[in-house]
Amino acid sequence: MVEKAEFSSNLYHPKHWPMWFGVLLMRTTLLLPLRWQMKMGTNIGRLVKIFAKGRVHTARRNIDLCFPDMSDTDKQQLLDNTFEETGKALFDTINAWWWSNERVQKHMTIKGTEHVSNSLDSGKGVILFAVHCLPLEMGARIFGQFAPGIGVYRPHNNPVMEYLQVKGRLRSNKGLVPKRDVRQMIRSLRNPDVIWYTADQDFGRSSAVFIPFFAVPDAATITGATSLARLGKANVLPFFVERNADDTGYNLEIMPALDNFPGDNETDDAIRGNQIVEQLINRNRNQYMWLHRRFKTRPIKGSPSLYK
C-alpha cells in the first residue's frame, strides 16, 4: 500500500520542467472562485472538442450505442455537454488535490454517511461502488472529510504525475492500492475499512463477462465486486457525486448496502451491478465520462470494432 508520496530530486530534471510549469499554471487557478473556474473549464472543453477528433468519435459512438432511441438533436446536445463538463473536470481535480479542507467543506453536501458508519460499526468493510463521473476526484476528497478510506488507483507512467496524484489523493485517503493488488484490497476490507471500486470501464477479456450495458447486449464487464465482497466480508454501497447545476458546489450521496450481495452467481451480480451503474449515470448523463472506449473488447476475438 502506498501511504506517502515519494519525492525525488530526479523530478527536477529539465525534461520535467514543462510539466512543472503546467502545475504552476494550474495552481494559480486556485485563486479563482469556483464559478469562474467552471466558465474557464467550459471553454477548455469546447476547444478539446474541436481538436480531439478521436475522443469526439469515441464519445459520439458510445452515446449512439447506449441510447439508440435518443433523437439526433439530444445526442448532439449530450455530446456538447460532455466536452464542456470534461473541461470543468480539470478544475475538479485541481480543487480536489489542492483546496484546503475548509474550502472543500464550504462547497459540499454529503448524504448517507450513516450507511458507512453502520457497516463499519458492525465489523464489515465497505466497497464504495462508484461510476466514472467526471467530478469523481472531488467525490473522494469530500468523502475523506467524513471517513478517509483506501483508494484504488492506476500508477501513472509519468513520475511527476505519479507524485502529484499520490500526494493529492492521500489528502482524502489513508493509503492507495494499485488496482491489481487484490490481496491488499481484501486485507483492507477485513480491517475493516473503506475502498473504492468501479466496474464501468472495459478492462479487457480477463475476469470479464459479456452482459448488457444500456442498449449494448454484450459489454465486457469485470466481476471483481463479487470476489471482493465475499473474500473481504464487505458490504457494497452505491456511491454518486455530481457538480451542482449552477456550478456552486458538489453533492455526494452514499446509498444503503445492497441486499443479498454477493449472490450465488458472479454473472448475475455483474448484471445487477451494471443496472446500478446505469441508474447512477442517468442521474446526470452530462457528467459521465463518455470518452472511454467502453465497448472495445468484443465477445468473439477478431470481431469488427464497434468504433470503426
Image (cartoon, rainbow, N blue to C red):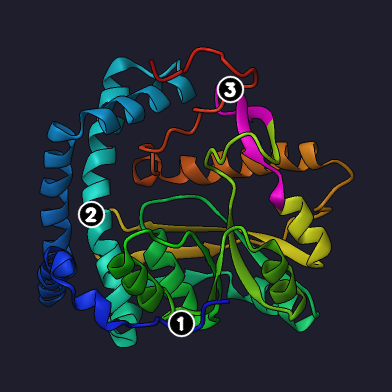
- Please tell me in which quadrant of the rendered image residue 105 appears: bottom left
Relative to 21, is 74 on the left or the right? right
Q: Which residues are magenta?
A: 210-224
Work out whether residue 223 or residue 33 is closer to the camera in this orientation and state it.
Answer: 223
| Residue plotted at (31% across, 74% down) | 97
Please, what is the three-letter code of the amino acid marked with disc 2?
Lys
Can residue 220 be found in the magenta stretch?
A: yes
* Badge 3 amino acid: Arg
Give the number of the disc on residue 145: 1
Q: Secondary structure at mark 2?
A: helix
Residue 114 part of the magenta-drawn span = no
**According to the image, label 3 marks what residue?**
298
C-beta proximity under 8 Å, tags 1 and 3: no
Image quarter hosting the C terminus: top left
**Residue receiving disc 2:** 88
Horizontal and vertical percent position of residue 274 = 63, 39
The percent position of residue 273, horizontal first and vertical second, equals 67, 44
Q: Residue at x 11, y 40 (%)?
A: 47
- On the question of residue 26 being in view, the answer is no
Looking at the image, residue 178 lies above or below residue 270: below
